Image: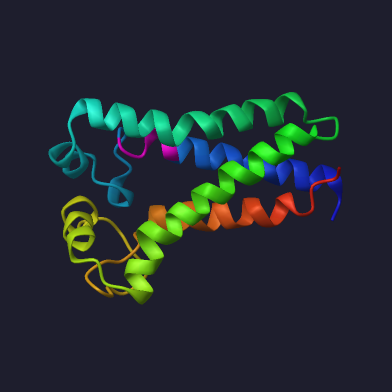
Amino acid sequence: MNGDVVRDLLLALQGLQVTILALHDWIPLGKLNDVKAVRAQDTLTQLLTVTAVQTVPFAFGLVCSVFYRYTPYPGWLYGWLWVSYGALFIGQIQAWWIPYLIRPQPKRAARYQRVFGTTHSVLPVRNGITPNTLHLMLHLATLATLVLLGFEPR
């Protein structure tokens, strides 16, 4: 795969993920999220903390990726992207896909129903939850980022 295409796709995917992570609990996106439900479940301090924790590492990686757009990524950046997006993907699997596909988690399912119950989903409910469309897009973008990192010219 052409290095410039890989780089452009990586930047686009990182931009998409940083945008989703930073804004999905704050900006109403129609049926893709339910900001009122999120705010009913979490305090402002909790929301600010979660947003910072889930956004800052990826925003840092995106800014550095833009900075090194026209040169090979330095080893530390390549490592940063692998570790951060790898950890994100593991978290997504643990938080959504294990309870959805393998092991029911009733407490998590009840919370997800309160927070995401009115959001759009293309998957059927299993074990009391369904990954909604916005999270599904985020998870697919994370997987695609990891795949493309394997093609990143070094």
Q: Main secondary structure of the magenta part?
A: helix
Is residue 23 within the magenta segment? yes
Q: Quadrant of the C terminus?
A: top right
Residue 97, percent from left and from top: 40, 66
Say which quarter of the image contains residue 130: bottom left
> Quick one: which residue is furthest to the left in this view?
40
User: Which quadrant of the rendered structure holds the N terminus?
Assistant: bottom right
The residue lying at 33 percent from left, 51 percent from top is 32
Is residue 18 toward the left or the right of residue 115 in the image?
A: right
Look at the image and tell me whether residue 13 can be seen.
no
Q: Was residue 88 drawn as part of the magenta stretch in this picture?
A: no
Tell me where residue 83 appears, x and y as whole percent: 61, 44
Which residue appears at 58% of the width and 27% of the height? 60
Name the one closer to the observer, 123 or 84. Answer: 84
Please name the residue shown 13% across and 39% down the image.
40
Q: Position of residue 118 (x, y in %)?
A: 20, 56
Q: Is residue 17 above or below residue 32?
A: above
Residue 133 or residue 152, whichever sits in front: 152
Please state the extent of the stretch shown in magenta in the rendering: 21-25
